[in-house]
Image (spheres, helix red, strand yellow):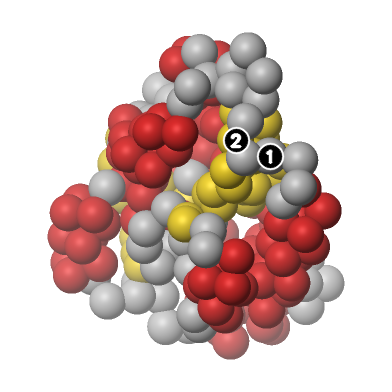
Amino acid sequence: MKETILLIACGALAKELAGLRKLNGWDHMKIQCLPAELHNRPEKIPPAVRAEIERYQLLFENIFVAYADCGTGGALDTVLQEFDIERLPGAHCYEFFAGDAAFAQLADEVTGTFYLTDFLTRHFDRLVKKGLGLDRHPELMSAYFGNYRRLVYLSQTVSTDLEVAARRHADYLGLEYQHKHTGLTPIEDGIKEQVVQWRN
């Protein structure tokens, strides 16, 4: 089947989205991922997404964006409105991993919660320690994480190794640890609701 939908996505979702594409037989969909490191510089997300839209808009019948607002302060939505393109709902990607209700409950439980997904757990050293410069300047820890009290690991897969790593990351940051298994159903449902309607 010809690819008719382009899914522009955060690189932190690449593995999960590829798995869902295969599982659901979404052969009509191409996934184009942007670097996960953009999460450390959210002001760069809107222009990066715009560049992908402009590059591919004449090649696909429909384009959908697998980002939440992700710290862009509405700037991503401003770009998408120009092109009449939808995105996954929510302020953060953690919201559509956990589901709206579960994420709202977690947010209400503890003010100052830092979240990890499978991807961020695997790449914590590169994206957090090195990405934020904590490996070179540990004195920055309080500036970045001084207002956090808890780390919640939202797991998409069942993995003892990742659970151990996530707990280790919580200890490194000096935060209490909590684990919640989300699976992929919330993000799968979000994509189905917005995208599958376009399937030929």
Give residue 149's position: percent from left, percent from top: 35, 72
Residue type at mark 1?
A: Phe
Give residue 122's position: percent from left, percent from top: 63, 39
Q: Residues within 10 Å of mark 1 (few under 14, many from 20)?
A: some
Q: Earlier in the sequence, mark 2 or mark 1?
A: 2
- Asked if the residue at tag 1 contacts the one at tag 2, i.e. Cβ–Cβ closer than 8 Å, the answer is yes
Q: Is residue 150 left or right of residue 35?
A: left
Q: Is residue 168 above or below residue 17?
A: below
**Dot 1 lies on which element?**
loop
Give residue 77's position: percent from left, percent from top: 51, 72
- In the image shown, does 192 or 184 lie closer to the viewer? 192
Q: Residues within 10 Å of mark 2 (few under 14, many from 20)?
A: many
Q: Is residue 127 left or right of residue 108?
A: right
**Dot 2 lies on which element?**
strand
- In the image shown, does 127 or 102 lie closer to the viewer? 102
Q: Is residue 30 left or right of residue 73?
A: right
Question: How many dots with numbers?
Answer: 2
- In the image shown, does 154 or 56 lie closer to the viewer? 56
Q: Which residue is mark 2?
A: 5
Q: Which residue is mark 1?
A: 60
Residue type at mark 2?
A: Ile
Residue at the image point whose x is 17% and y is 54% from the top: 101
The quadrant in which residue 111 appears is bottom left
Give residue 46's position: percent from left, percent from top: 66, 71
Q: Is residue 3 above or below residue 128?
A: above
The quadrant in which residue 105 appears is bottom left
Residue at the image point whose x is 68% and y is 79% from the top: 43
Q: Is residue 45 above or below residue 101?
A: below
Q: Is residue 35 visible?
A: no
Residue at the image point whose x is 20% and y is 51% from the top: 102
- In the image shown, does 85 or 126 lie closer to the viewer? 85
